[in-house]
Each structure stands twice: as structure tokens, then as C-alpha cells.
């Protein structure tokens, strides 16, 4: 029987998909399931975006496109970044990819090998560590701490760096915590990076437009001193409710762009042409659907945070971005993954145990509030009943 190379013994996955599969299975058996597990907006892709894709197909855009994406789309991305960050990247350094996740796959594959270190947030998006392990590089977790409001610390991050550090992965606003790292911290980190000129930076800014209150998104693109080693990851999935379209992009630095382009040619040739036209309509069309979605998330955020803080043994910080709350459940006496699986099987509420996002996730669960207010209220009531009646 053929078997894959040994590196596949080290590759991980994303438990949110396993939870989604189990939740779907339970729902198919007739159980009432509220899904606060999966990280995708519950809104529809705005109509004008869908229409642009349909029109593209009708207009005959059914062939291959340039591997890095159609030029109008790359120009629109550059213009959108200029409007949002005041820095305009070169359109010919942008690579459109089938989903934001693909950029992390590419960057980690490009930089990871035995003998080097790659830093990544813990708790953080599980694919970072999975891919680092796959390449044989040493995964070095950057602790993301509750007492720091789930922002990363420049000092702690820099203390983990050395001449072996080949790549540093940053994510703000963050999954799974909703943490947003303030500008002062990013300034300090960038200043410290001068001591490690060989280290590339992958800044995952996919939640950059989902912010609340006074929170400010500071793009790493705004630091010219690291422009020659910054890989900026962004995409449409979260901002425009387009997770299933599989569309993302990255801005690559000069020295890595050719490698990224060749990887694209080798792996997927180009992204689905109609999806690229949809992405163009999303960036150049009206943005009110994005604003409405963020306003709805904001209302749900209050509901979730207030509700969680009323539960016995649970405390929850107010997240500043993304659509996740990361409550501390250590006071319940339950282990996080045990609580998540018992809530799904026994109470019909899907959420994700913190350890699925890293070692430091123990004692927490991730609650995605990409669900209706009625569903959130019902889920909180079910969790409350569960905690009052069940024991670890
Ligand atoms: N980066 C982070 C932090 C995410 O949470 C996700 C999706 O959950 C992605 C990237 C990937 O997004 P996409 O669905 O566009 O691949």
C-alpha cells in the first residue's frame, strides 16, 4: 500500500471542520444544534458581488487567467489597500489565491525547513503550527495572553527571536481571541525586528475590517522599514461573507514574489475567473453591506460577552475585533475540549475547545458570534442550564 512521505505524520488540521461535520450529522438526526463553532459570517454574499460572478461567466470569462490574478483585480486590491492604509503596494507584487489560507501554506512552505525557527501565535489559527511542523522547521509559540487583552507583546515576541528565526507570523485582529494589537506594540515590534534582518514577517490581516469601538487596525504594510520582508495576507472570506468562494490575496516582497508566482503556476494555475470578477466587484462596489455586517457583529458581541459573564465559572474579556469571544472557563472545573464536546452532544451547542488553537488555549473555548441574536440567546441559555446541572 503506498504511503505519503514522513512529513505527513506531522501535518495537523483544523478541528472547526470536524466540529462542523459532527454538528451537521447531529442536525441530520433531528437534533437542534446551534453552531457557534465555525468561523464564517452567517450573512449572504451581497447580491452585487454574486451578480458580477454570474455576469463574468455569461460574458465568457471561463478560461485561465494570469497565475497571479487578473490585472484589474490586482489594481483594485492595491487601490483598496491605499485607501485603508495610505500605502499603495505594487499591483505586480500581488498574488490572488484560492482562499487566504493558501498564502500561509505558501509562505510557510517557502521559509520552513529543518534547522530554522518559525514563530506563530498561540492560541492562534491551527494551520500555522500544522504547516510549520510539516516543513520540519521548529515551531516557536508566541504566547497570546488574556491579561494582555489577547494582543501580542512586542517584548515577548522579540525575546523568542534569534538568528535561526526565518519567519514570524502575526495575526491582528486575531482568531480565536478577537484580540487587536495596539499600534504602540506593533511600533515596538517593528523597531526590534531591525536586529533580525533575515526574518520574514507574515502578517495575517484577514479580519482587518472587522473592528469595534475605538479599536484601530494597524497594517504592517505601513512600516516601510520591513517592506522588503513583509508578506501581507488578506482576502474576501470574512469581510464580504465569501468563505466558500475561495478567494484571497497576498502582497509579496520583491525577493519572494517569483517563488510565490511559481508556486501558484505549479499548484492551481489561476483562481476561478468568475470568483476574481466577484472579488473585483466587492472591492470597487458599495461597502454598506460590510458596514452593516460589522454593526450586526457588534450587537452580537455585547450579547455574547454579557451572557458569558453571567454564566457560573465563566469570565469573558470584550474582544475588539473579528467575530470571536474567547471566554475563560477554568472556573467551571471542566477541561476545555471536554466541555466543548459535552456541550455539542448534550446541549446542542457547537463551539471549539481552546486547545485546538494551541497549548495556551487550555481553560478557554472559542465562541463564534457569527449567528443570529436569537440563536446566541438560546445557546447561552443552553450552556447555562448545562453548567448548572452537569459536573466535570
Ligand atoms: N487567517 C485566519 C486568522 C483565519 O481565521 C482564517 C479562516 O478562518 C483564514 C486566515 C483563512 O481564510 P480563508 O477562508 O480565506 O482561507
Image (tube, rainbow, N blue to C red):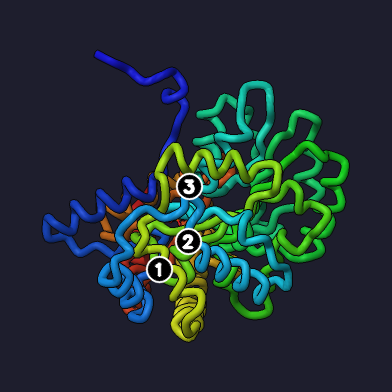
| Residue drawn at (54%, 53%) of the image | 95
- Whether residue 388 is visible: no
104 to the left or right of 34: right
Kindly report which numbered mark, 3 or 2, lies closer to the viewer in this rendering.
Answer: 2
Q: Nearer the viewer, residue 322 or 63?
A: 63
Q: Which residue is mark 2?
A: 70
Residue 277, numbered label: 1
Q: Position of residue 230 (x, y in %)?
A: 70, 50
| Residue drawn at (51%, 72%) of the image | 305
Q: Nearer the viewer, residue 170 or 228?
A: 228
Q: Secondary structure at mark 3?
A: helix
Residue extending furthest top?
1
- Whether residue 330 is visible: yes
Mark 1–mark 3 Cα distance, whole angstroms, equals 19 Å
What quarter of the picture does the N terminus occupy? top left
Q: How dense is the environment of label 1, judged by Cα within 10 Å: few (below 14), some, or many (20 and up)?
A: many
Amino acid at each position: 500500500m503506498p504511503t505519503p512521505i514522513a512529513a505527513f505524520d506531522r501535518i495537523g488540521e483544523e478541528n472547526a471542520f470536524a466540529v462542523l461535520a459532527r454538528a451537521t450529522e447531529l442536525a441530520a438526526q433531528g437534533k437542534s444544534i446551534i453552531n457557534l463553532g465555525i468561523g464564517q459570517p452567517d450573512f449572504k454574499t451581497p447580491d452585487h458581488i454574486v451578480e458580477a460572478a454570474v455576469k463574468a461567466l455569461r460574458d465568457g470569462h471561463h478560461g485561465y487567467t494570469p497565475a497571479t490574478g487578473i490585472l484589474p483585480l490586482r489594481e483594485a486590491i492595491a487601490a483598496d489597500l491605499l485607501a485603508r492604509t495610505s500605502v499603495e503596494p505594487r499591483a505586480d507584487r500581488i498574488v490572488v489565491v484560492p482562499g487566504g489560507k493558501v498564502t500561509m501554506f505558501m509562505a510557510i512552505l517557502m521559509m520552513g525547513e529543518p534547522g530554522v525557527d518559525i514563530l506563530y501565535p498561540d492560541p492562534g489559527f491551527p494551520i500555522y503550527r500544522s504547516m510549520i511542523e510539516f516543513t520540519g522547521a521548529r515551531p516557536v509559540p508566541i504566547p497570546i495572553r488574556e491579561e494582555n487583552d489577547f494582543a501580542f507583546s512586542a517584548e515577548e515576541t522579540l525575546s523568542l527571536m534569534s538568528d535561526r528565526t526565518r519567519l514570524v507570523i502575526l495575526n491582528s485582529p486575531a482568531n480565536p481571541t478577537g484580540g487587536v494589537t495596539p499600534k504602540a506594540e506593533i511600533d515596538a515590534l517593528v523597531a526590534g525586528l531591525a536586529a533580525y534582518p533575515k526574518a520574514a514577517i507574515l502578517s495575517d490581516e484577514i479580519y482587518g475590517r472587522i473592528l469595534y469601538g475605538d479599536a484601530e487596525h494597524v497594517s504592517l504594510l505601513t512600516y516601510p522599514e520591513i517592506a522588503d520582508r513583509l508578506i501581507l495576507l488578506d482576502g474576501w472570506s470574512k469581510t464580504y461573507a465569501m468563505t466558500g468562494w475561495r478567494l484571497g490575496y497576498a502582497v509579496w516582497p520583491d525577493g519572494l514574489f517569483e517563488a510565490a508566482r511559481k508556486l501558484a503556476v505549479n499548484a492551481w494555475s489561476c483562481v476561478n475567473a468568475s470568483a476574481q470578477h466577484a472579488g473585483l466587484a466587492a472591492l470597487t462596489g458599495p461597502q454598506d453591506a460590510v458596514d452593516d455586517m460589522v454593526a450586526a457583529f457588534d450587537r452580537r458581541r455585547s450579547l455574547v460577552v454579557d451572557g458569558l459573564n453571567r454564566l457560573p465559572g465563566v469570565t469573558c474579556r470584550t474582544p475588539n475585533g473579528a467575530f470571536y469571544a474567547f471566554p475563560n472557563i477554568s472556573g467551571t472545573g471542566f477541561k476545555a475540549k471536554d466541555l466543548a464536546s459535552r456541550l455539542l452532544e448534550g446541549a446542542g451547542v457547537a463551539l471549539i475547545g481552546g486547545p485546538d488553537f494551541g497549548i495556551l488555549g487550555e481553560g478557554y473555548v472559542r465562541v463564534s458570534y457569527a449567528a443570529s441574536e436569537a440563536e446566541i440567546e438560546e445557546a447561552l441559555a443552553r450552556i447555562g442550564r448545562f453548567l448548572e446541572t452537569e459536573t466535570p
